[in-house]
């Protein structure tokens, strides 16, 4: 299947998941994850209506974003991978939104280097996996309060990465917990759900889903 076919198929699945949750598909922003994806494939996805793209690595993203600056209207670029403090200044010049604010310290560095306001999401390690970044659920309220008062950072929601599992129902409680945390903080966005579990994430309230393989298949640089 072509990238366009894949996008149409995913959009159909998103709409069906939204209907099951009595939601509108317009509430959900689809972010195409373009880590390792060639610029030509990104252009193809853009031509099929995708306007939001997510990158995991700052240096790889810079080369792509600079080479795609002719796209109109300009796409929205999301930083969705772990952000090292020594890459913050470059990241702030490249990305419109940062999903992976995983510590107060990182937020402080971002605030000091930001030249304009930027929307950010707090990454939460809901699963408790030691291999994943993120703030522990029981520390999110305090961390969010500290980050929210920093200049230039506009906290708009929470983000998590669920464990890979053949049974997506296993991750439903994690998505539900993130939604509970989001609601308790009065925030808007939930960035959760990827190729293997985005339908469950939407049923549990995701407002942003991050789709890579379902769009681009096995295409690699």
Image (cartoon, rainbow, N blue to C red):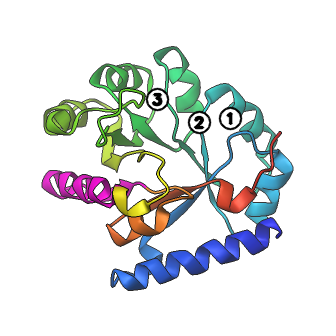
Q: Which mark is residue 26?
A: none
The answer to which of marks 3 and 2 sits earlier in the sequence is 2
Q: In the picture provided, is 221 more to the left or to the right than 57?
A: right
The residue range painted magenta reads 171-192
Question: Residue 127: percent from the left, percent from the top?
Answer: 31, 41
- The answer to which quarter of the image holds residue 172 is bottom left
Residue 207 seen from this side = no
Assign a secondary structure to mark 3.
Answer: loop
Question: Residue 165: percent from the left, percent from the top?
Answer: 46, 51
Residue 96 on the magenta segment: no
Q: Quadrant of the N terminus?
A: bottom right
Residue under the point 80% across and 43% down: 220
**What residue sits right under mark 2 in the picture?**
56
Query: Outermost residue, right direction?
Result: 40
**What residue sits right under mark 1 in the picture?**
61
In three-dimensional space, the C-alpha distance between marks 2 and 1, rounded to whole angstroms, equals 8 Å
**What residue sits right under mark 3 in the picture?**
115
């Amino acid at each position: 299947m072509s990238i366009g076919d894949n996008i149409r198929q995913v959009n159909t699945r998103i709409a069906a998941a939204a209907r099951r949750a009595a939601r509108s598909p317009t509430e959900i922003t689809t972010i195409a994850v373009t880590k390792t994806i060639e610029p030509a494939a990104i252009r193809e996805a853009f031509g099929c209506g995708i306007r939001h793209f997510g990158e995991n690595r700052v240096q790889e993203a810079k080369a792509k974003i600079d080479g795609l600056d002719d796209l109109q209207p300009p796409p929205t670029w999301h930083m969705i991978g772990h952000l090292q403090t020594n890459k913050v200044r470059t990241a702030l010049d490249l990305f419109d939104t940062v999903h992976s604010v995983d510590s107060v310290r990182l937020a402080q560095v971002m605030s000091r280097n930001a030249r304009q306001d930027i929307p950010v999401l707090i990454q939460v390690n809901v699963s408790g996996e030691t291999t994943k970044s993120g703030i522990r659920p029981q520390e999110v309220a305090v961390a969010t309060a500290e980050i929210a008062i920093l200049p230039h950072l506009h906290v708009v929601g929470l983000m998590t990465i669920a464990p890979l599992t053949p049974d997506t129902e296993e991750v439903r409680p994690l998505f539900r917990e993130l939604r509970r945390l989001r609601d308790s903080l009065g925030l808007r966005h939930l960035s959760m759900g990827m190729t293997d579990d985005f339908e469950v994430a939407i049923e549990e309230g995701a407002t942003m889903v991050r789709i890579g393989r379902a769009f681009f298949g096995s295409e690699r640089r």
